[in-house]
Image (spheres, rainbow, N blue to C red):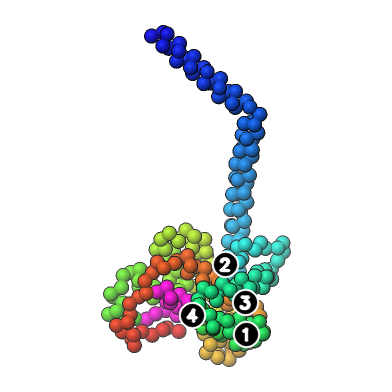
Amino acid sequence: MNNDLDKLLKAVRVIAEGVSDFLNKEEVKILTTKLASGLQQLGEFTLKFYTYSQQQKKMYIEMSQYGWFPSHITFKTPVLEGEAVDNYMERCLTENYDDVKELIMESYPHRKPIFKEAFKLYEEERFIASIPLFLSQLDGLSVEYGLSPFFTSTKLPSSEKKKLSDADQLKLDKFPVYLKQALEQKLLGQSQDIISYYEEVITNASKSFIGEQTKNLDMTNPINKLNRHGILHGHVAFLEYADRKNCLKIISLILFVDHVLSLIGNKYDQINVDSAPTEIEKIN
């Protein structure tokens, strides 16, 4: 018995000495040092990235109050020290203009001729025509995902509405309002956490002056002249909307909507309202 124990202890001692010799080898010490350094750098990178993303998030919330909206373009473009929101967003979109144009047109090939014309008008500085054209397409992007347009809710007769689940009834609200409610009720599945990053931006989008009812706007503030209803319906108080900045704001909103819709993916089926097409009307 003692002999077996001695053999076991001797074997353990040999293994321990081997491990000690291995750990004391110069190349292993270097590897260990590099690994520790790598872990430290990874921790520092993670902290820096988190700090950067939170700073970006704060900026997104601020700029969405002024009619600008984030996308992958803004996330990869750092803000310069002391740079104002308008200057930053104009730089983001103009420096990446070709990518922005290609992304929007290729994402909606059946809308490509219309978007192509809208971008051409922008390039020719014909903002009077380009802004309404962009706005007309923005309103329909979410409809392709079985949701209501960006600016208008879908109204159904009570008999049709009762057939829908609570979740489908939420889809009848205009897109940013639906998105806000879906976030609050955690209905966005795997995309919930990612889209939650934009929660405050979505809240601002749901009550933005761009989509607000004209009667609710303070027209002493010139920023409110970029209003979809006022522009498309030719209200006299909204005739001075046409400038480069306002056109870029609408392009940034299209990018944001496309970004969020791509996160939602094909999760939703189109609401079946074919049985009563003539009874559906939009609330302006």
In the image, which residues are magenta? 140-155
Disc 3 and disc 4: Cα gap in Å?
22 Å
Q: Which residue is at the far top?
A: 2
* Image location (x, y in percent) of residue 70: 58, 67
Instruction: Compare marks 1 and 3 and give the one earlier in the sequence.
Output: 1
Q: Which is more toward the observer, 215 or 77?
A: 77
Disc 2 versus disc 3: distance between alpha carbons? 13 Å
* Identity of the residue drawn at 55% across and 91% down: 234
Q: Nearer the viewer, mark 4 or mark 2?
A: 4
Separation (CA) of disc 1 from disc 3: 12 Å
Q: Where's the C terminus, which quadrant?
A: bottom left
Q: Which residue position is annotated with label 2?
A: 71
Q: Which residue is mark 1?
A: 121
Judging from the image, what secondary structure is the residue with disc 1 in? helix
- Residue under numbered circle 3: 248
Tag 1 and tag 3, C-beta contact below 8 Å: no
Q: Mark 1: few, some, or many residues within 10 Å (few <14, many ≥20)?
A: some
Residue 238 is tagged as: none
Left or right? Give the position of 249 relative to 259.
Answer: right
Which of pointers 1 and 2 lies earlier in the amino acid sequence? 2
The image shows residue 246, relative to residue 20, as above or below, that is below
Query: What's the residue type where badge 4 is placed?
Result: His
Marking on residue 110: 4
- Magenta segment includes 66: no
Amino acid found under the numbered disc labelled 1: Leu
Find out whether residue 145 is within the magenta segment. yes
Question: Residue 8's x, y, as percent?
Answer: 45, 15
Cα separation between marks 1 and 2? 23 Å
- The earlier-in-sequence mark between 3 and 4 is 4
